[in-house]
Image (cartoon, rainbow, N blue to C red):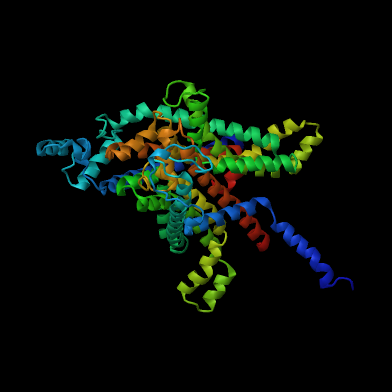
């Protein structure tokens, strides 16, 4: 027993910690996400040419040293456009997820706490929203409010909201009967405080992972709408819009659509892998 | 003497299933009514004059008389409540109105276009399940390397957006290798690329849950029992483990149909295929009110119905669920 001191135990613990940390998948995912965030904040750091500069005699350059990702029909540099597009695509994804979650929290709280009638009403509203596949719901919204970046965010958020709302409601119902809520009620805390300080944080904890992955999904859905020509109008550097612009040239210039799409895929992949890693960590800590 | 009534468990199970089906159908009809109402009022908030849309847009320069005539013809001069009542009445008779942009009854457009979309979505769903079964049954529980490779493939497949996959397939197999036609909707050759583009991401999602549950199932005692009875590994996997392992995947199929319909919109546009998805997209662009409502309603009806069927299928495959939810 006398040998069991901190000095003997610590190295073993350290090895275990580092071993559980360095796994290539999550590491790559987080690195790529960090790269995206930096590219969104300071695109000049990576891309040196103007994403909108038209150079007619440079049109349709295949990928090479001068233009890493090639150029489009007007000689615009695809690499710069993808890098500059990060800001808008990431913003759309984050804003849409935030909106979806905002709607979901309101509906989930109303359903979970508002009593039987309100719960049934919320259940109904969700059933109605669930009757539409997400893209059809988003298309209906765009049909009503027109296209553009604003409606695109709302449409994507609306498409995702029912799924989140169902989860929030389930969580609220699971948490509302917990002992610490009862304790807070017994202590005489005001309801608002209990909801904000106890109920919501605890109900939302398992949803963090879903949200991480949700941002990736939101970027995909928003790109699908942009791809259909219902998002940012061309020639805006936005990944979905770039795909839509490159569609007509698939037969002879594959790089116009390949690279923006690759960034969409890498982003979703990174959010999925990072989200799953987070899930394992959280579950490991909770159990 | 106590009267002993023997109940046939199989019969009882079927009646319970039927009762549940009836309830779910009634609920589904109510949801569809709400959907019809919501779409009707939502689309009447739409900016832009529908009369102009009927007459071919503002660039058509219609005269005041033709505008007035079209307004009367399509009943747009009546109050909204009257329009709504008329709309619901016609809906009950299966009349979805006339398409503004195509000057055809919406039901006829639906009848002409749905077959192509059904073909596409069902072949994609079948292909996706085929991929899932092949991949998971062959690789689940086969050691770390095989498992993590297959798992990587699934994660990657699930992250592929169909529109990008569709464009890649188009570039490689239609324009590059010229194996399949790049557009159109006649014959099975035009169906291959769109179905693959829809199936691969879906297979990725379903395979992830199926693999997890298959690996759990293979550790169950009854699998060990089957093995000790001398069954071959393949027989154990297909005859015993699979039935348990597909359950989460099937419950995901409801979501999958929604994802397929959403995907069909984009894929039909990319491959210039005939179908409801592309039709809906064109209707939205042309501000064609009746056609947009009609297609959305049809899609919602199919989706609601499919979810009921999947729910019942789930109960049928796993009788343990009945006691809990019936």
How many numbered tags mark residues here?
Answer: 0
Residue A287 in the figure: left or right of residue B314: right
| Front-most of residues B158 and A42 | A42
Residue A273 position, x and y percent, is: 60, 51
Give the quarter of the figure containing the N terminus of chain A. bottom right
| Front-most of residues B52 and B297 | B52
User: Which residue is depicted at the point 65% across and 32% down?
Assistant: B134
| Front-most of residues B118 and B286 | B286
User: Which residue is depicted at the point 53% across and 70% down?
Assistant: A198
Would you place residue A84 above or below residue B52 in this image? Answer: below
Residue B226 position, x and y percent, is: 77, 35
Would you place residue B267 above or below residue A138 in this image? Answer: above
Q: Quadrant of residue A275?
A: bottom right
Residue B66 in the figure: left or right of residue A174: left
Would you place residue A1 above or below residue B112 in this image? Answer: below
Q: Is residue A188 visible?
A: yes
Residue B258 position, x and y percent, is: 46, 41
């Amino acid at each position: 027993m006398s040998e069991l001191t901190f000095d003997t135990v610590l190295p073993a613990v350290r090895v275990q910690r580092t071993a559980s940390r360095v796994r290539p998948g999550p590491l790559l995912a987080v690195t790529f996400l960090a790269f995206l965030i930096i590219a969104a904040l300071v695109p000049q750091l990576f891309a040196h040419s103007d994403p909108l500069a038209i150079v007619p005699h440079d049109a349709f350059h295949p990928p090479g040293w001068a233009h890493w990702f090639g150029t489009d029909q007007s000689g615009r540099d695809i690499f710069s456009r993808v890098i500059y597009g990060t800001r808008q695509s990431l913003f759309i994804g984050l804003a849409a997820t935030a909106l979806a979650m905002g709607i979901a929290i309101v509906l989930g709280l109303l359903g979970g706490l508002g009593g039987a009638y309100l719960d049934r009403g919320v259940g109904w509203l969700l059933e109605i929203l669930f009757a539409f596949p997400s893209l059809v719901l988003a298309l209906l919204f765009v049909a009503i409010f027109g296209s553009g970046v604003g409606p695109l965010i709302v449409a994507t958020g609306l498409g995702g909201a029912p799924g989140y709302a169902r989860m929030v409601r389930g969580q609220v119902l699971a948490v509302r009967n917990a002992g610490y809520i009862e304790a807070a009620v017994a202590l005489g805390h005001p309801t608002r405080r209990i909801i904000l300080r106890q109920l919501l944080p605890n109900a939302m904890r398992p949803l963090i992972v879903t949200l991480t992955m949700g941002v990736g999904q939101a970027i995909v859905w928003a790109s699908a709408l942009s791809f259909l020509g219902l998002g940012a109008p061309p020639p805006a550097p936005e990944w979905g819009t770039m795909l839509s612009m490159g569609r007509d040239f698939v037969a002879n210039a594959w790089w116009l659509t390949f690279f923006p799409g690759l960034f969409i895929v890498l982003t979703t992949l990174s959010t999925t892998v990072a989200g799953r890693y987070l899930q394992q960590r959280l579950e490991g800590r909770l159990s | 003497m106590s009267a002993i009534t023997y109940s046939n468990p199989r019969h009882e199970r079927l009646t319970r299933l039927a009762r549940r089906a009836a309830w779910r159908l009634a609920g589904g009809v109510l949801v569809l009514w709400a959907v019809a109402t919501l779409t009707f009022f939502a689309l009447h908030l739409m900016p832009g004059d529908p009369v102009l849309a009927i007459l071919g847009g503002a660039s058509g320069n219609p005269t005041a008389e033709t505008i007035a005539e079209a307004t009367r013809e399509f009943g747009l001069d009546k109050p909204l409540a009257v329009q709504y009542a008329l709309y619901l009445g016609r809906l009950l008779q299966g009349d979805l109105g006339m398409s503004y942009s195509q000057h055809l009854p919406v039901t006829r457009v639906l009848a002409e276009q749905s077959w192509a979309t059904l073909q596409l979505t069902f072949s994609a769903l079948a292909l996706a399940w085929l991929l899932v079964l092949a991949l998971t049954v062959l690789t689940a529980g086969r050691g770390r390397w095989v498992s993590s490779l297959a798992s990587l493939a699934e994660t990657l497949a699930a992250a592929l957006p169909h529109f990008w996959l569709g464009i890649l397939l188009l570039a490689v197999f239609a324009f590059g290798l010229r194996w399949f036609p790049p557009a159109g909707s006649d014959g099975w050759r035009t169906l291959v690329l769109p179905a693959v583009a829809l199936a691969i991401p879906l297979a990725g999602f379903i395979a992830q849950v199926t693999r997890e549950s298959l690996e759990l199932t293979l550790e169950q005692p009854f699998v060990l029992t089957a093995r000790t009875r001398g069954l071959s590994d393949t027989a154990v996997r297909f005859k015993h483990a699979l039935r348990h392992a597909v359950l989460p995947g099937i419950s995901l199929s409801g979501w999958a149909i929604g994802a397929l319909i959403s995907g069909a919109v984009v894929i039909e546009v990319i491959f210039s295929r005939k179908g409801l998805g592309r039709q809906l997209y064109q209707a939205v662009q042309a501000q064609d009110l009746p056609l947009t409502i009609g297609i959305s309603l049809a899609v919602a009806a199919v989706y609601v119905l499919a979810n009921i069927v999947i729910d019942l299928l789930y109960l049928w495959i796993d009788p343990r669920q009945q006691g809990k939810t019936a």
